[in-house]
Image (cartoon, helix red, strand yellow):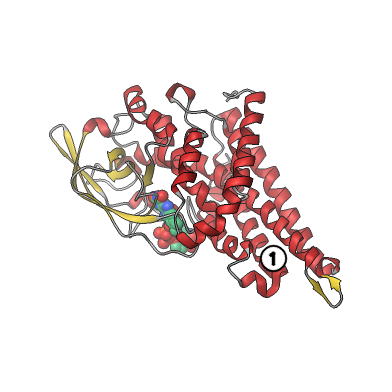
Amino acid sequence: MPDNVDADTFNQLRETVQRFVAERLVPNEMRVEIEDDIPEEIVQEMRDLGLFGLTIPPDYGGIGVNARQEVQLAQIFGHTALAFRSLLATNIGIGARGLIFEGTQEQKQQYLPAMASGELISAFALTEPDTGSDPASLTTRAVRDGDDYLISGTKRYITNARRAGLFTVMARTEFDRPGADAISAFLVPADLPGLTIGKKDRKMGQRGTTTSDVMFDNVRVPASAIIGLTPGRGFRLAMRVLDRGRIHIAALATGMCDRLIREMVGYARERRQFGKAIAEYQLVQAMIADSYTDYRASKALVEETAGIYDAQGAARTEASAAKYFATEAVGRVADRAVQVHGGAGYMSEYAVERFYRDVRLLRIYEGTSQIQQLLIARQILKGE
Ligand SMILES: Cc1cc2nc3c(=O)[nH]c(=O)nc-3n(C[C@H](O)[C@H](O)[C@H](O)COP(=O)(O)OP(=O)(O)OC[C@H]3O[C@@H](n4cnc5c(N)ncnc54)[C@H](O)[C@@H]3O)c2cc1C
């Protein structure tokens, strides 16, 4: 895919995002942790900078960065509390991408400009109470009723559900056969009768990001709410959306490795034990060196994968490998960062304690590490 955004414009955008992260987001990390919410003035600044529309094509009011450009920006967002990126993430990624990939012109016109401006937040509703790693067995039903469908079921852990104005909902439209071909992707406005949002989940980390259940009780939508209008394509579309999302998550993990190394190095230089800075001890240096190596390997892998995606329009196995490696790597780096901080690393006023909890999620959502291993092995054994 060619660059939608030319090099000069992109460099300016990158510098703007770098400045915004350093000057506005990093200083507000602790506030977000304590309040478990992102201050409204920061949300507005994100809108003003066009950040909700980073990956939405310019024809629909977005900036339209390609995968290589997106991974550079995602690495910058990885330098701060991951909740900030999470607020943008559904619009940049899983909430909007299905519509961008397969929506009709009319569907795109209806929703994408409002998503690009950040006026409309979208969410992606695939997971259910009994269906996580195996989404082909999901049970949310969409039953045909004249020109409409009636959707019933429960979706679980849906990011940004409480802020969302629109859900992309994967639901079963055929009931006499199991599996992927019986699932369709619906665009469901949040204000329809029968749609309710559960309470805010209490979770381990990424405070400031919210997830909730979303319940559908005979929610009536027209047949024209199916993305691309063709039923039965929803599962494959969801997998396509997640493939691209995995490159983004890998980039985010890579950026966070860099931040954690900076935190480690800063502390190791300052902290003195046995009469010397702990940075002078080789066992501490080994933790820094191993973390730097994890960081460089993640960076190389994710940037190469984004290049393949732009050249070929897909990078399934490579994206799984990048997500698997980079998210496991940031887990190791966060663990070492806490260790280098000693007792301070266990205390909430130090960023590494928060990041240690934040990064744990990266190995779980958008496909667990085990699911990435299965996907990689399956593709390789098929000879792809
Ligand atoms: C904070 C947060 C935000 C989320 N946001 C969203 C969202 O916006 N939209 C959405 O749809 N979902 C979202 N999710 C859901 C997330 O994608 C799922 O939690 C994830 O896919 C794992 O599913 P599960 O929790 O049901 O775990 P399970 O599938 O029950 O897995 C449990 C364990 O079993 C392992 N396992 C499962 N199957 C196999 C297998 N075949 N071989 C080997 N091991 C296996 C898994 O790797 C894992 O270790 C979110 C989750 C969280 C925690």
Residue 247: name its quadrant.
Answer: top right
- SS under mark 1: helix
Instruction: Residue at 48%, 59% (x, y): give it.
Output: 207
Disc 1 residue crowd, few under 14, some 14–19, many 20+, Cα 10 Å: many
In the depicted view, which residue is nearer to us: 80 or 127? 80
Q: In this view, does 254 lie to the left or right of 222?
A: right
In the depicted view, which residue is nearer to us: 85 or 146? 85
Q: In which quarter of the image is the C terminus?
A: top right
Mark 1 vs ligand 1: CB under 8 Å?
no
Rendering quadrant holding ligand 1: bottom left
**Given the current orientation, which residue lies at the most extreme left position?**
146
Residue 223 in percent (x, y) is at 22, 32
Q: In this view, does 288 lie to the left or right of 100?
A: right
Residue 280 in percent (x, y) is at 86, 67
Q: Is any atom of residue 155 visible in this view?
A: no
Residue 218 in percent (x, y) is at 17, 47
Instruction: Residue at 46%, 60% (x, y): give it.
Output: 35
Residue 358 in percent (x, y) is at 54, 59
In the depicted view, which residue is nearer to us: 359 or 377? 359
Residue kind at label 1, given as amino acid type: Arg
In the depicted structure, whether residue 283 falls above or below residue 21: below
Q: Quadrant of the N terminus?
A: top right
**Given the current orientation, which residue lies at the most extreme front position?**
41
Q: Is any atom of residue 115 visible in this view?
A: yes
Instruction: Residue at 56%, 55% (x, y): give it.
Output: 29
In the depicted structure, whether residue 336 falls above or below residue 102: below
Q: Is residue 45 left or right of residue 270?
A: left
Q: Name the residue under label 1.
A: 336
Q: How many labels does the image show?
A: 1
